[in-house]
């Protein structure tokens, strides 16, 4: 396949989705991933244009084979399918397997809450490399296995819990390394199981710890349970099938307002609801722009030169 054909196919990978991750402050899942995605295409680990194959289906469930297509393309299709089913039947659930990296998991429940629905999404690394150690262990046995829940409300920003069940997403370690910065203590251990702040220790055989520090058995338990689908699990709940949507959204706003009346503890300026940091970050970055570290930008411009489009797209 010629470089130009490869680039044309890569354009279907929805780069705006990656930019959205940068906008909300999740730089580890932003444009830095483009380099890895292109590398996976070249290695045959991502198949652009792979079919979205429905292997099993009922009125409100489905099992999808992503055939190693772009994970965020296939997951977006699966979420859209779940929303359509929940619109008709109230509740929908489906699993998606054999897909590549899905990107920022928060993108998908956001689709549902914008339709007046509640959504839960979990993701597991499946057959991919493991990143995290189980609680009490030091070797990698689990993915970062994120869990995300989105809820509709009257608030301007989404009410969205989007968390790795490990102390941190692996991409954040890669981001710190690319910036030449240490990671906080409690994120990782080295190959001998000793706590470390050097991100290079992770890539030298270390592991990410479960979320929860000395209570890491809780994060480990969530990660263990999120793994059961060996891929992506999606469930969507149409609020209108349970109660009036406007009442639900109003009560969610009122609950958030009540939560935020809690006086801030020492070291804090205010109480935030889940998803508020991302919403505030997006507003700020839309005004001020997005910082991209030199290593990432140099890699992207080198890729443009490799496929012969640097001049056409106006490389700075």
Image: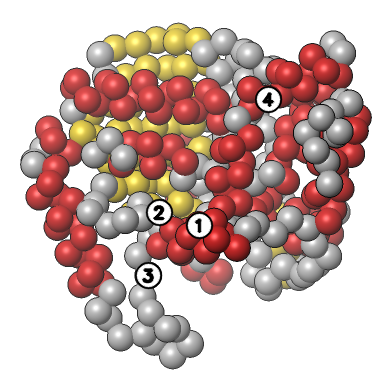
Residue 240 visible in rendering: yes
The residue most toward the bottom is 266
* Residue for point 83% across, 56% down: 294
Q: Earlier in the sequence, mark 2 or mark 4?
A: 4
Kindly identify which numbered label has been placed on residue 248.
Answer: none
Q: Earlier in the sequence, mark 2 or mark 3?
A: 2
Q: Give above or below for 3 relative to 219.
A: above
Mark 2 → mark 3, Cα distance in angstroms: 12 Å
Q: Earlier in the sequence, mark 4 or mark 3?
A: 4
Per the image, label 4 sits on a secondary structure element best described as: helix
* Circle 2 residue: 161
Using a 10 Å C-alpha cutoff, classify the residue at mark 4 as few (fewer than 14 neighbours), some (14 to 19) or many (20 or more). few
* Circle 1 residue: 282
Q: Earlier in the sequence, mark 4 or mark 1?
A: 4
Using a 10 Å C-alpha cutoff, classify the residue at mark 1 as few (fewer than 14 neighbours), some (14 to 19) or many (20 or more). many
Per the image, label 2 sits on a secondary structure element best described as: strand
Asked where in the image residue 166 lies, by quadrant, the reply is bottom right
Q: Nearer the viewer, mark 2 or mark 1?
A: 1
Mark 1 → mark 3, Cα distance in angstroms: 15 Å
Using a 10 Å C-alpha cutoff, classify the residue at mark 3 as few (fewer than 14 neighbours), some (14 to 19) or many (20 or more). few
Q: Nearer the viewer, mark 2 or mark 3?
A: 3
Using a 10 Å C-alpha cutoff, classify the residue at mark 2 as few (fewer than 14 neighbours), some (14 to 19) or many (20 or more). some
In the foreground, 226 or 68: 68
* Circle 3 residue: 272
* Circle 4 residue: 11
In the foreground, 299 or 126: 299
């Amino acid at each position: 396949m010629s470089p130009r054909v490869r680039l044309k196919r890569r354009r279907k990978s929805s780069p705006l989705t990656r930019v959205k991750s940068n906008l909300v402050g999740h730089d580890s899942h932003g444009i830095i991933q483009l380099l890895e995605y292109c590398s996976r295409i070249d290695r045959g680990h991502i198949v652009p244009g792979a079919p979205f194959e429905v292997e099993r289906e009922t009125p409100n469930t489905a099992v999808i084979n992503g055939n190693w297509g772009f994970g965020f393309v296939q997951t977006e299709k699966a979420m859209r399918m779940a929303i359509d089913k929940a619109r008709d039947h109230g509740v929908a659930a489906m699993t998606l397997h054999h897909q590549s990296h899905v990107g920022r998991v928060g993108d998908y429940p956001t689709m549902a809450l914008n339709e007046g629905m509640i959504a839960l999404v979990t993701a597991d690394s499946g057959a991919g490399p493991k990143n995290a150690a189980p609680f009490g262990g030091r070797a990698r046995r689990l993915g970062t296995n994120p869990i995300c829940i989105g809820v509709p409300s009257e608030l301007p920003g989404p009410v969205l819990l989007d968390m790795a069940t490990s102390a941190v997403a692996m991409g954040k370690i890669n981001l710190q390394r690319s910036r030449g910065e240490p990671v906080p203590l409690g994120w990782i251990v080295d190959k001998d199981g000793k706590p470390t702040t050097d991100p290079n220790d992770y890539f030298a055989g270390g592991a990410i710890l479960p979320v929860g520090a000395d209570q890491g058995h809780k994060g480990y338990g969530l990660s263990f349970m999120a793994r059961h689908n060996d891929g992506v699990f999606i469930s969507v709940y149409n609020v209108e099938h349970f109660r009036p949507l406007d009442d639900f959204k109003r009560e969610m706003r009122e609950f958030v307002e009540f939560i935020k009346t809690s006086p801030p503890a020492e070291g804090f300026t205010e109480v935030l609801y889940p998803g508020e940091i991302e919403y505030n970050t997006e507003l700020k970055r839309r005004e001020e722009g997005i910082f991209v570290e030199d290593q990432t930008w140099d890699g992207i411009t080198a890729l443009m030169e490799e496929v012969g489009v640097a001049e056409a797209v106006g490389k700075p």
